[in-house]
Image (cartoon, rainbow, N blue to C red):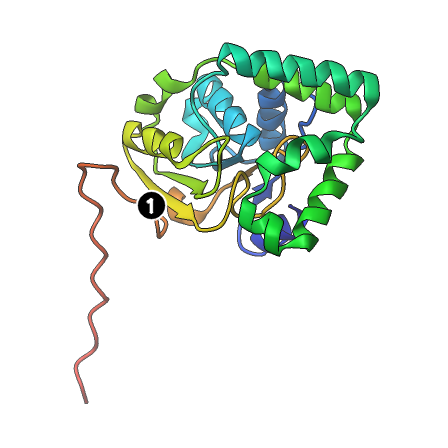
Amino acid sequence: MEKEVALLKTRLPVLAPHYLGLPLGEAAGKVLREMEEAGLERGVFVGLSMGGYLAFELFRRAPERFLGVVLSSTRAGPDAEEAKRNRYALRERVLKEGVGFLPEALLPSHLGRTTQATKPEVVEKAKAILLEASPEAVAESLTALAERPDSTPLLSRMQVPALVLVGEEDTLTPPEEAKRMWKALPDAACSSFRRRATSPTWKTPRPSAPRFWVSSPSSFKAGRRPRGLGGGPGRARTPPRPPPPQPPPG
């Protein structure tokens, strides 16, 4: 994520809080404190996977801080009971055995089949990220994932420009989930990535590298919509602005 944040910082104020191992409520408080310290009153909240759940928690607590939101490889609904049991079982195993088994256990479902077959360097990078994670932080994050609330009722209240992203090969938060969010959001666009899974834009696994950042682009402050964000289904998109008038010849 460092490269992406560094690139964005050449154009925008950006925060990328570290929150692995924190409950979502504490993570949201940390984000808001860092925004205050950086002098950011409002921002565009970008959340990938667990970062999407954090974006929902932030909207629940401070909707007035939102200029826009990007939700990537995430879902609004809570875990089903079986998914909760699986997370708690994984938590106990991590605390008992450490993180050495995580690549074998998680990468087959967290990386797309195309990436696994054709991008060995991405697979190795994903393994390294998992193996560098703190077992305690992973365990606490698994608890936060299992106990997160249902954010579906928030979607219709998110009256800001939204972008929903998903990988076509994502089996954990599949395109159908993204479409449901897109249809429920008042002002949203949806885009899918070919031959990508859970982390379509960066191609890294979700559990030990949750991605979240806040930026404050001038296009939102000025009331303009950034390119690629438009009306949701059944809503007219904002027409492009006409070109400025040209001076008469001569």
Dot 1 alpha-carbon crowd within 10 angstroms: few under 14, some 14 to 19, many 20 or more: some
| Left or right of residue 238, residue 214 in this image | right
Amino acid carrying mark 1 in the image:
Leu
Q: Position of residue 237 (x, y in %)?
A: 21, 45
Compared to 78, does 16 lie above or below? below
Q: Position of residue 219 (x, y in %)?
A: 39, 49
| Left or right of residue 179, residue 42 in this image | right
| Residue at image location 65% in from the left, 37% down from the top | 107
| Left or right of residue 74, residue 99 in this image | right
| Left or right of residue 201, residue 247 in this image | left
Find residue 134 and report its image quarter.
top right
Residue pushed farthest bottom? Answer: 250
Q: Position of residue 172 (x, y in %)?
A: 50, 30
Depth check, front residue: 179 or 35: 179
Disc 1, SS: loop
Depth check, front residue: 103 or 4: 103
Quadrant that contains the N terminus: top right
Q: Position of residue 67 (x, y in %)?
A: 41, 36
Depth check, front residue: 194 or 137: 194
Depth check, front residue: 244 or 151: 151
| Residue at image location 68% in from the left, 27% down from the top | 20
Residue pushed farthest right? Answer: 97
| Residue at image location 62% in from the left, 22% down from the top | 27
| Residue at image location 58% in from the left, 50% down from the top | 115
Q: Identify the residue under disc 1.
A: 229
Find residue 7 and report its image quarter.
bottom right
Compared to 174, does 142 lie above or below? above
Regarding residue 23, the answer to whether it shows in the image is no
Quadrant that contains the C terminus: bottom left
Regarding residue 157, the answer to whether it shows in the image is yes
